[in-house]
Amino acid sequence: MSTLYKQHARIFQISTILYFTPCSYNERLGKFEHTYKNLAVFCVALTLTIPFWVMDIRLMAINYLSTYTKVYAAFGSIELLIYVSVIMCAILNVFVKRKRITKLMNVLFRPDSLLDRCGSLHMERRYDDNQKLGVITLIIVVCFCIKMWYHKDVESKILGIMVAGRFLASWILVFVHRMHVKAIAQRMEQLRLLYTHESTWHNLSTFFNRYDLYYGQIAEVDRCYSLPVMLVFLLVAVQLIYLAEDWYSSGATPYKNDVFHTILRQLWQMLYGALGYYTIAACDTTSKEVEETALCTRHFDDYRLQNTRAAKQIQKFLLKNLHQKKKFSACGFFDIDNTVIYMVFSSIVTYLVILIQFKQLETDLTQSEGVFNVTSNLTTPGPS
């Protein structure tokens, strides 16, 4: 297995247990395989997820949605549906595409003797995400412990466990997608180093073949993981909208009590922003690595081969590269790059405007009903 996989073996082990990864590495054969053991894991994961899903909806409806106004309850129901669907859809998506994902992992995470020799310790450290995941896990555990201490009733504690569990599962899902994306970036960087050190006619065909192989995995990653990733982005947008609305409400009505719990809730919602950022950053960086690797062939230094077959191959490669799409996509709806950040912010602003209008309308209707009741009481003739 590749160095990147070895570095994050524990993450992949957890993702296999959650069935975000449908295969295991066979040491004897030296490749990833989907076995009956993985199929059993899928059955167990699905069996546990369905009652978890039902209980989650029930507790959220009783403890929160029932206390909201009609407007908030409607938006809260949409958020809850997205929230509980992410993990379920991810598991079903991985099962349906298990063969394709297994093939993808065999391309990205198996050793490549030619490119692996171009790696370095510094490169391995840059692609190591264990520390980031450890920090996120620590924050989740601390917030979870505080929530357990804050809530006194059993139902709220159970709901807190479910929220922390599905949030951590969402992080694992994002990191699995991130590892596939970063594997492409690492291979492209290694390929660029190989070309820089050994840019001769004999290595050009190897360069083109390797580039086409790893470039083709961008589309494969999209086919395998774009659906759950798109749901994660929807969830991130909804949570950031709630955060913005919370800030707006607190600005209009200053805190009177329970400041600590409010800050904790807002910190929890900010973590969703980090969830989206890590996905965007990995995809954007990898797209740039792919572009830089393709363009490095412009600097072909062997002047003895000018106007030869090698030069023509490079020109043909560069022309083809102009028309290649190098960005990751969320089910074809939008490209995953820095423009997603602006899209999310515009969604937040639009939502806040709509929500404020709805709240004002609801307030006006409530006041109108009160005035109507008072007027009715005054105009109704009393008993003679």
Image (tube, rainbow, N blue to C red):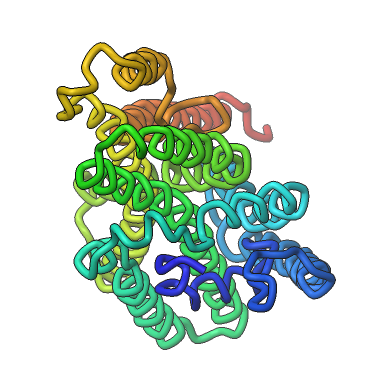
Q: Is residue 322 above or below residue 283?
A: above
Evaluate whether residue 123 shows in this view: yes
Q: Quadrant of the rendered structure where residue 380 is?
A: top right
Q: Nearer the viewer, residue 161 or 129?
A: 129
Q: Quadrant of the rendered structure where residue 320 is?
A: top left
For image coordinates 52% across by 25% down, the residue present is: 333
Q: Nearer the viewer, residue 14 or 354?
A: 14
Quarter of the picture holding the C terminus: top right
How many numbered discs, if any? 0
Q: Quadrant of the rendered structure where residue 22 is?
A: bottom right
Image location of residue 130, percent across then percent down: 35, 73
Image location of residue 151, percent across then percent down: 47, 82
Q: Nearer the viewer, residue 36 or 251?
A: 36
Q: Is residue 55 left or right of residue 130?
A: right
Q: Is residue 63 above or below residue 281?
A: below
For image coordinates 43% across by 20% down, the residue present is: 324
Image location of residue 242, percent across then percent down: 39, 47
Image location of residue 8, percent across then percent down: 44, 72
Q: Is residue 241 above or below residue 4?
A: above
Evaluate whether residue 348 shows in this view: no
For image coordinates 76% across by 70% down, the residue present is: 38
